[in-house]
Amino acid sequence: MGEISIDPKFNIHETYKKVRILNPYRNGSAPAQGGYILDTYPAAAAYSLRKLSGSYTGAAIEVRRSGDNLKQDIGFDANGELNTAALLSFVGAGDGFVATWYDQSGNGQDGLQSSVNTQPKIVSAGAVIMKGANPAISFDVDFLTVPNSKNYFKFLHNGQYAISSVIETPTTDSLISVCGNGAGTKGSIGLSHYYDLRSGNTIFGGFISNSGFVGEILSPTAIQNSTYYNTLLFVDLPAPVIGDRMKAWINGSLIPEQNTKGGTPSTADATYDFEIGGLGDNNFKCTGKYQELIIWNNDKIADAQIISDEVNNYYSIY
C-alpha cells in the first residue's frame, strides 16, 4: 500500500494541515492519528512551538517584551499550536524575546537565557516571526542553555540517541550551531552538531569528541540548494561497525556519508552544559530560524522515515 494524499482537513495534530497517511508496512510505528509525536516516541528532551505531547500541560516559551522587560509564559491554542494571539497581546507593538524554551518531554530540561543580549527573538515590531506558515524563533548569534546538564546529556557522547531539528540557515558566510555540549573541538567531551557555510561550504556536520574523535559525519553535498532543513542525526556509539556509529537523514533522505572515526567513548560528563543554538562554549552561536528540536536517548534509525514524514507533514519543508 502506498501513500495517499489527503487535502485539506485530515489532522494528525488537531490543526489544519496537509497530511499523508503513512504506509503501515514501513519499519517502526507511526504516531496515532489525532495524537502527538511524543505519545508514540517519548523523548529525553523536546522543544517546539507546537505541542508535542498529549500529556504536556505547560507553556511553549517564556517571552520577555522590549517595552518594560516584563516576562510571561505563552502556551498553545486549542489546535496545539503556539498561541500567537496571546503572544501579540502581551508583546504589543515592540519586540519579544525568548527567555525560556520549555522542555515538553517531562524531564525538566528547559533551555534558558537570562542575558537580554543573547535571547533569541520571536516577535519583531509587533509581528510574529515566521518560517513558512509557522512561527519561528530567530537566533542572531544567540543561544539557550540547559543548566546543570553535563551529566544528563552524557548519552550524547557515549550512548545511543537520535536528534530531530527543524531550522532555517542563512546564506551568509557562517558556521551555524544546531546544538551541542562539546565546544566543536577535540579535547572537549561532548557532541557538536552544526551547518558550516563558511568560505562557500555547504556542509552538515556532527561529531563526538574526547581527547580525539569518537565519531564524525560530514555531508558536503546533501544540503546544497536549500536553506530549510529537517535533520535527523542517529548515533550508535557501541555499534561494532565504525561506519554505523553515525548516520543522518536530511529532508527525508539518508545521506551517503558514514562515520570513519573509531575513538573510545568517554564515560565522564560533558565538558559543557547543553546548548540550543550553541556548542557549549563561546564560539559558533546560531544565526537562523529555529522551530523544533527533539532528542531521544535511544536509536531511532528504524523509525527514520516515519519521524521525518511526521515533521515534514507539519512544517512542509521539502
Image (cartoon, rainbow, N blue to C red):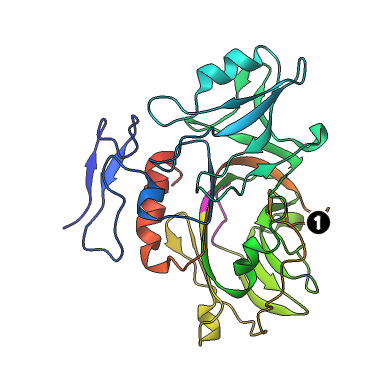
Question: Which residue lies under the disc numbered 1?
Answer: 281
Prevailing SS of the magenta stretch: loop
Q: Is residue 46 magenta?
A: no
Q: Is residue 99 left or right of residue 37?
A: right
Who is closer to the viewer here, 152 or 246? 152
Q: Which residue sits at x=35%, y=56%?
A: 306
In the displayed structure, 116 sits above or below 2; it is above
Instruction: Estimate the x, y position of residue 225 in percent, counting from the top left.
Output: 55, 51
Q: Quadrant of residue 143?
A: top right
In the displayed structure, 198 sits above or below 72; it is below
Q: Which residue sits at x=51%, y=17%?
A: 85
Q: Is residue 104 left or right of residue 201?
A: left
Is residue 180 among what the camera can see?
Answer: yes
Residue type of the residue flagged with mark 1: Asp
Q: Is residue 80 left or right of residue 105?
A: left
Q: Which residue sits at x=76%, y=60%?
A: 272
Q: Which residue sits at x=43%, y=55%?
A: 42
Please tell me whether mark 1 sits on a helix, a strand or a loop: loop
Q: Quadrant of residue 93?
A: top right
Q: Is residue 79 left or right of residue 317?
A: left
Who is closer to the viewer here, 267 or 250? 267
